[in-house]
Amino acid sequence: MRARMYGLVLVLLCALLPGCGARGAKPGAHLAGEVTIGSRPLPDDADAAILFIPVAPAGRTSPVSAPIVRGRYVARHVPLGRVTVMFRVSRPTGRLLDGYSGGLPEYENLVPEKYMGGLPLDVIEDNPHQDFQL
């Protein structure tokens, strides 16, 4: 339950922050790469995203998010300097949550516990091979 709430908070945070996703953001680096868990590719049915949060935001620098599709992501305008990289990787369990009209699908979090707080990363320049092994 805690992992599900964590993923929901991450998605809502990104949706509510102005400039999230590079709209109105200052120029930054173009990062792309692969995300794996335990040296394995993400499951085909995974719903996944990556979020780059500036540690010491200067000016109008905002977090930048990008979807992870088939284990790969492309993120534009990632803030330069130190960022915390957060991951949301979940997949449906096939069960419905009780208490909702019609039921909501239940999702399980796939991000290992030790990466729930994110990873530090120093962004200096474009990097088309910025892979993350969780």
Image (cartoon, helix red, strand yellow):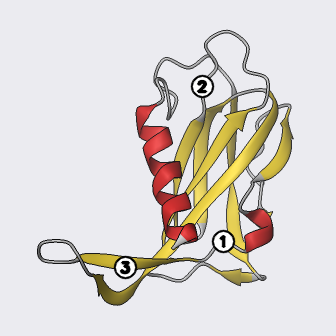
Establish if 130 lies above or below 100. above
Q: Are marks 3 and 1 in contact (CB under 8 Å)?
A: no
Q: Position of residue 111 (x, y in %)?
A: 66, 71
Dot 3: what SS? strand
> Residue 116 in the image: x percent, y percent?
71, 62
Near-viewer residue (1 or 40): 1
Amino acid, disc 1 = Val
Q: Secondary structure beneath disc 1?
A: loop
Query: Looking at the rendering, which quadrant does residue 94 occupy?
Result: bottom left
| Amino acid bearing label 3 | Glu
Above or below: residue 70 compared with residue 51: below
Circle 1 sits on which residue?
Answer: 111
Task: Point out residue 122 in the picture as x, y percentages from the top left corner.
Answer: 87, 37
Q: Is residue 74 above or below residue 78?
A: below
Residue at the bottom extreme of this rendering? 94
Q: Nearer the viewer, mark 3 or mark 2?
A: 3
Left or right: 13, with 76 as reference point = left
**Mark 3 — residue?**
106
* Left or right: 92, with 125 as reference point: left
Q: Which residue is mark 2?
A: 62
